[in-house]
Amino acid sequence: MQTSSSAGGQNLILYDGVCGLCNRLNQFVLPRDTRDAFDFASIQSGAGREVLTRFDRNPDDLNTFYVVADYRAPAPALLSKARAALFVMKTLGAPWSWLGVFGVLPDAVLDAGYDVIASNRYRLFGRYESCLMPAAKYKHRFIDV
């Protein structure tokens, strides 16, 4: 996978680059990720497509939020939908990690809630014509920009 020479996060957030909700999530995570635990790539980017293909996922399906835990390790783990979101909150630490209480729910319940939001996200949060560019101070955290 191609990565920026200065990117250094342990985990990779894969997001729909034209989704208003996904971009808001990135804007939420970046200032709160004080340990630089996350790097970012849009699903539409070459790196995003490569990662999803490696995990036998369809990179043209933009309805799923992914996190690749330990993405630089020999055996990274792909998390999706609600489990990916809970992983992000847990990694950010308190008070966000407190949302981990929802982790006791079965995946089917969590993902049903996720799917309702995902199927309405463009209508509720908007859609951009192209992927947004990160602020200059965060650009080094984005792969394939």
Image (cartoon, rainbow, N blue to C red):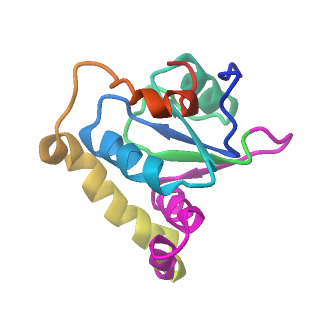
**Vertically, is 84 above or below 65?**
below
In the image: residue 121, left or right of residue 28: left
Residue furthest right as drawn: 74
List x then y, in percent, for residue 43: 48, 29
The stretch drawn in magenta includes residue 22: no
Q: Is residue 113 above or below residue 106?
A: above
Closer to the camera, 103 or 141? 141
Indicate whether 91 appears above or below 118. Answer: below
Magenta extent: 72-101
5, 2: nearer the viewer: 5
83 part of magenta stretch: yes
Q: How many marks?
A: 0
Q: Position of residue 78 (x, y in %)?
A: 65, 47
Image coordinates for residue 8, horizontal then vertical, percent: 70, 37
Quadrant of the snapshot with the N terminus: top right
Residue at x 56%, y 23% (from the top left corner): 49
Residue 42 visible here: no
Magenta region, mostly helix, strand or loop?
A: helix
Measured from the top left, where is residue 87 in percent x and y?
56, 62
Q: Please, which residue is most extreme toward the front here?
A: 137
Residue at the spot 44% in from the left edge and 51% down from the top edge: 31
Left/right placement of residue 36 relative to residue 104 reads: right
- Name the residue rendered at 18%, 44% in the picture: 125
Q: Is residue 59 visible?
A: yes
| Residue nearer the viewer, 34 or 128 | 34
Residue 115 in the figure: left or right of residue 94: left
Q: Which residue is depicted at the point 46% across and 47% down?
A: 30
On the rendered structure, is 127 left or right of 94? left
